[in-house]
Amino acid sequence: MTTPLEDRLRTELRDEVTGVELRSDFVSAAVEDVRVRRRRRQVGIASSFVVVTLAGIGGIAIDAQTERDGNPPPADETTPPPSVPTEPAPSLDFADIQTIQPREMAWENLPWRDTALPQVLPTDVAAAPTLSNDPIDHAVALVGGPGSTVGVVGDDGQLRRLDGVSLERIRDPAGYRSSPVKQGSLTPDGSVAAFPQPDALVVVDLADGSSQRLDLPGFNTRVVWSPDRQHILVGREGGPSSLVDITDGSVGDVPYNAYQTTFTDDGAALEFRETPQEVWTSELIRWDGTDKDSRLPLSIWWGGETPPDASDGRLVLAGSVDDIHPSEETTRGRNGWIVLDIDTGTPIAMLRAPGAWYGTWLFGQCAWLDDETVIVQGEPGLLAWTPSTGALERVSTGGSQETSLATAVLD
């Protein structure tokens, strides 16, 4: 028996893809994706995630300084008191929504962006030479291979297979398994990789091949590096997120959720959290370990499995805005990659893509390539999007949710 939520999803998907040729199992696969997301989001403070993810899911749309020296906030902070809204959150001007037109913006017609990534991302991990026999200075990307194998794309654009490290596929309480490669696995400079594991966290120095395994009970599935490269935020299914100090192995639970959190350059944690309030749909919480912890009301919905990313006072994430007031039952969201101002919560721009890109938008890459350009997962491969000009460029074919990028050394 289907639930009303699933019935609504099926209806919205069919409405959105009218006239578009998709594989026959598209709707059923999308429903199963949502079921998995629902099971995942029934943990901690993110339990409301799936409902907002569903809004219009078929149509892909698109700092205050501290003195912490890049250190993440301590683990014993408490949740800020509920905000009291005084006025509606700033909203996105629909004139700032950029839509990729499948025919006018065909992949093959876009110019190439010159980056450290090869134009065709190598993915044949099983056939690649081992990293120990072909060492590198740093990686530009990690790719998931068969089983628990990990591919390492060096700064020469060539693929190696990580060896000498015992890894297994990640599992969750429902029994679903996935690659140990997560989008946050690589440090921005590509020198070190972190892999969530069942009851553990594995950290690997990619230059010398050394590794350490830290005990961390639980179904660990998400990793986010702090700017100091000494702390890793780890998300787990069925439990709170934890901050791990890899220098001494200490672990502390944190009030922010690793699935919806990133760090600013000064070490503050930025968490995108949905609220039950009617005045706005979500809020941006800054956790900086001081009495300046603050909340900003937002007018957008969280929209994907991709973690947010911060750069130069702005945040980019996969999300949704509403065509009409969210209290209306007929609300249909415009989904895509959204850039917003961290200090004010104002949405600046959105990039929408064709409905057939549903899977890449929900699960693909979404991060800053430099201070002006965002890298996102298009259907054929990685795209560079410059919100201020609307420019779109090809970066690399290939890439998936089992790809991690060293964003600081790509451009």
Image (cartoon, grey):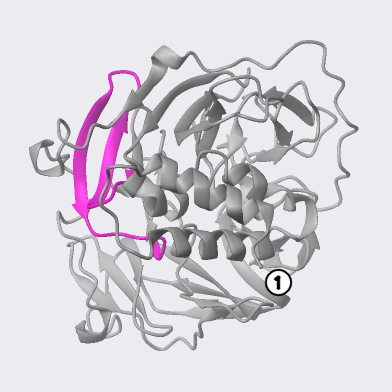
Q: Check if residue 401 falls in the magenta segment.
A: yes
Image quarter where the C terminus lies is: top left
Horizontal placement of 273 versus 177: left or right? right
Where is residue 359? Give x, y as percent. Answer: 40, 54
Q: Where is residue 272 in the image (x, y as percent from the top left)?
A: 66, 39
Q: Residues within 10 Å of mark 1 (few under 14, many from 20)?
A: some
Location of residue 105 by image quarter:
top left
Percent position of residue 222, x then y: 59, 63
- Helix, strand or loop at label 1? It is loop
Q: Which of 68 and 182 is in front in this view?
A: 182
Q: Is residue 197 above or below residue 4?
A: below
Question: Mark 1 highlights which residue?
Answer: 249
Against 61, residue 260 (above or below) is below
**Residue positioned 59% across, 65% down in the render:** 36
Q: How many labels does the image show?
A: 1
Q: Residue at x 71, y 51 (%)?
A: 257
Which residue appears at 49% of the width and 85% of the height?
167
In depth, the one of 175 and 154 nearer the eye is 175
In magenta, the rendered stretch is: 376-403
User: Which amino acid type corresponds to the residue marked 1 in the rendered image?
Assistant: Gly
From the viewer's side, name the closer residue of 393 and 42.
42
Residue 411 visible? The answer is: no
Give whichever of 322, 299 is nearer the camera. Answer: 322
* As drawn, 370 above or below 144: above
- Which residue is drawn at the image coordinates 51% and 52% (left, top)? 10
Picture coordinates of residue 93, whole percent (x, y): 48, 13
In the image, is residue 354 above or below residue 133?
above
Query: Where on the picture, by quarter, is residue 158?
Result: bottom left
Q: Is residue 74 visible?
A: yes
Is residue 85 rendered to the left or right of residue 108? right
